[in-house]
């Protein structure tokens, strides 16, 4: 019985009970899934390279010897299967659920694009159905043993990112930005959303930060001086990374061989930080 009520709240059916302990909305993972760490990759808006960074980070962690998976929650703009050359692979059904596709480098992937008859078919679904699909990628997919799962979130702070934060046990997020976004408060909205859901921000990645001349190797900061360090300091984010604009990155992703790109110079600091701050062994 609640202190404010004169009757037994447990059987009254009204919403007057003690709400000091909010109910967990976490969804139960599939019995065939053993996922140790879940890392969300978010951005303020689309087209800044969030899927690119998700793929590169996942591939870098795989190269370090971990079992890595990507849950593609960007349901209306899924690009992970193409980047990993998974165009023709269809997930198979088992009594416990679907098995994800596996890329040549060993990374496991589940994406709505793997389930559509044609990868060019649009997903014309309403928000709650999209959000439910993402939850099902957690509950109904047999992920097996995974050290690090990266969740490629849809851009912004809408329904689906909120569902992911509430229903998946997200250990932390990586925020991906473009140089222009860094100064436009869009990143801060994503950081604040993580704060509201009490999810730590593990790192900040500035994509397309500069162009490196292939001849003289001079770095040109086309969009002006970077503000990544200021923003990281303001929000107490320890790890940052900068990626250049590089046509070879787009080419590797179009060829389905994103895992062949050598990212050591750009992402080592961040992947070392992930490994140390969220160890799995
Ligand atoms: P988002 O997931 O934020 O919508 P994507 O990762 O799909 O963005 O990237 C958008 C486009 O930009 C893709 O065609 C991708 O290949 C390209 N791209 C992303 N980052 C880079 C980069 N650093 N250099 C060159 N092309 C890039």
Image (cartoon, helix red, strand yellow):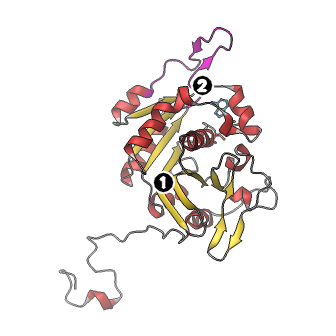
Residue 9 lies in quadrant:
bottom left
Residue that label 2 marks: 244
Q: Would you say 157 lies left or right of 276 here? A: right
Quadrant field for ligand 1: top right
Mark 2 within 8 Å of ligand 1, using the beta carbon: yes
Q: CA distance from mark 1 to mark 2?
A: 26 Å
- Against 117, residue 216 (above or below) is above
Q: Of label 1 and label 2, which has the lower sequence position?
A: 1
- Which of the two residues, 156 or 69, is positioned nearer the viewer here? 69
Q: Which residues are magenta?
A: 206-228
Residue 44 located within the stretch drawn in magenta? no
- Element at badge 1? strand
Q: Position of residue 123 (x, y in %)?
A: 72, 59
- Against 262, residue 156 (above or below) is below
Q: Residue at x 66, y 32 (%)?
A: 261
- Which of the two residues, 61 or 222, is positioned nearer the viewer here? 61
- Which of the two residues, 241 or 45, is positioned nearer the viewer here? 241
Q: Would you say 171 lies left or right of 253 here? A: left
Q: Would you say 166 lies left or right of 216 here? A: left
């Amino acid at each position: 019985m609640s202190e404010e009520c004169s009757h037994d709240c447990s059987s009254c059916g009204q919403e007057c009970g003690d709400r000091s302990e909010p109910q967990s909305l976490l969804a139960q993972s599939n019995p065939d899934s053993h996922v140790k760490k879940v890392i969300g990759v978010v951005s303020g808006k689309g087209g800044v390279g969030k899927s690119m960074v998700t793929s590169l980070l996942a591939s870098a962690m795989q190269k370090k010897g971990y079992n890595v998976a990507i849950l593609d929650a960007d349901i209306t703009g899924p690009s992970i299967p193409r980047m990993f050359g998974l165009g023709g692979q269809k997930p198979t059904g088992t009594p416990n659920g679907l098995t994800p596709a596996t890329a040549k480098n060993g990374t496991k992937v589940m994406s709505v694009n793997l389930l559509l008859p044609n990868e060019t078919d649009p997903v014309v679904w309403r928000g709650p159905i999209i959000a439910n699909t993402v939850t099902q990628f957690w509950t109904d997919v047999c992920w097996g043993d995974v050290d690090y799962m990266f969740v490629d979130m849809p851009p912004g702070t809408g329904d689906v990112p909120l569902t992911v934060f509430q229903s998946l046990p997200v250990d932390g997020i990586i925020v991906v930005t473009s140089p222009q976004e860094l100064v436009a408060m869009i990143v801060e909205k994503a950081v604040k959303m993580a704060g509201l859901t009490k999810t730590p921000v593990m790192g900040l990645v500035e994509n397309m930060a500069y162009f490196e001349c292939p001849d003289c190797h001079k770095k040109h900061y086309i969009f002006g001086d970077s503000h990544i360090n200021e923003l990281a300091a303001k929000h107490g984010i320890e790890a940052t990374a900068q990626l250049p604009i590089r046509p070879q990155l787009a080419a590797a992703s179009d060829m389905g061989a994103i895992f062949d790109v050598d990212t050591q110079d750009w992402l080592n600091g961040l992947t070392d930080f992930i490994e140390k701050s969220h160890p799995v062994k």
